[in-house]
């Protein structure tokens, strides 16, 4: 079976890494996948055992109704947001902020951007969050 989106070299590379790349699933494979999911086998291990890519495993689990995405992060509270802005203005690094809040650096940056967007253009972030202005 050929792919219309991959070069022959890309296809060969993927076929070399995943023996069953771009092949239809058999009912036996689907049943084996169901059993592995029930046993709590990690997706990477499922992929290795079935000769499929991790993404193929995820898509098949979704089609079988067995894929459960990770729950979203806990919501930000107004108190968390005020503390985040305060610590950011004090010069705390993204890595340290991530550690303080138990979130990724990307989540910290994203929240800071959203907080800024929520109060522009008419209200400065410090006024909206009742914080002192940033030192210049």
Image: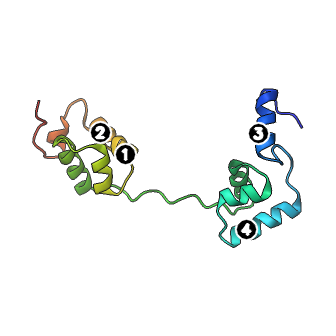
Cα distance between the residues tagged 1 and 4:
33 Å
**What residue does disc 3 label?**
14
| Residue nearest the viewer, comparing 23 with 111 | 23
**Residue 36 — which label?**
4
x%, y% of residue 117? 31, 35
**What residue does disc 2 label?**
118
Cα distance between the residues tagged 3 and 2:
44 Å
Labels 4 & 3 near each other (Cβ < 8 A)? no
Q: Spot the residue most to the bottom.
A: 39
**What residue does disc 1 label?**
105
User: Which numbered disc, 1 or 3, marks the residue that appears first in the sequence?
Assistant: 3
Circle 1 crowding by C-alpha within 10 Å: few under 14, some 14–19, many from 20 = some
Cα distance between the residues tagged 1 and 2:
20 Å
Question: Image point 82% across, 43% down: which residue?
Answer: 22
x%, y% of residue 88? 22, 43
Question: Image point 88% across, 61% down: which residue?
Answer: 27
| Residue nearest the viewer, comparing 78 with 135 | 135
x%, y% of residue 130? 13, 46
Question: Image point 28% across, 49% down: which residue?
Answer: 97
Circle 3 crowding by C-alpha within 10 Å: few under 14, some 14–19, many from 20 = some
Q: What element carries label 2?
A: helix
User: Which numbered disc, 4 or 2, marks the residue that appears first in the sequence?
Assistant: 4
Cα distance between the residues tagged 4 and 3:
23 Å
Answer left or right for 89 relative to 27: left
Q: What element carries label 4?
A: helix
């Amino acid at each position: 079976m050929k792919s219309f989106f991959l070069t022959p070299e890309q296809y060969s590379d993927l076929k070399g890494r995943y023996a069953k790349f771009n092949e239809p699933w058999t009912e036996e494979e689907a049943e084996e996948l169901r059993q592995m999911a029930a046993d709590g086998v990690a997706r990477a291990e499922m992929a290795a055992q079935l000769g499929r890519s991790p993404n193929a495993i995820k898509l098949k689990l979704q089609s079988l109704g067995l894929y459960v995405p990770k729950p979203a992060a806990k919501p930000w509270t107004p108190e968390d947001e005020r503390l985040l802005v305060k610590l950011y203005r004090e010069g705390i690094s993204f890595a340290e902020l991530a550690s303080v809040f138990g979130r990724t650096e990307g989540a910290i940056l994203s929240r800071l951007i959203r907080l800024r967007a929520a109060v522009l253009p008419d209200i400065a972030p410090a006024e909206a969050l009742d914080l002192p202005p940033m030192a210049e």
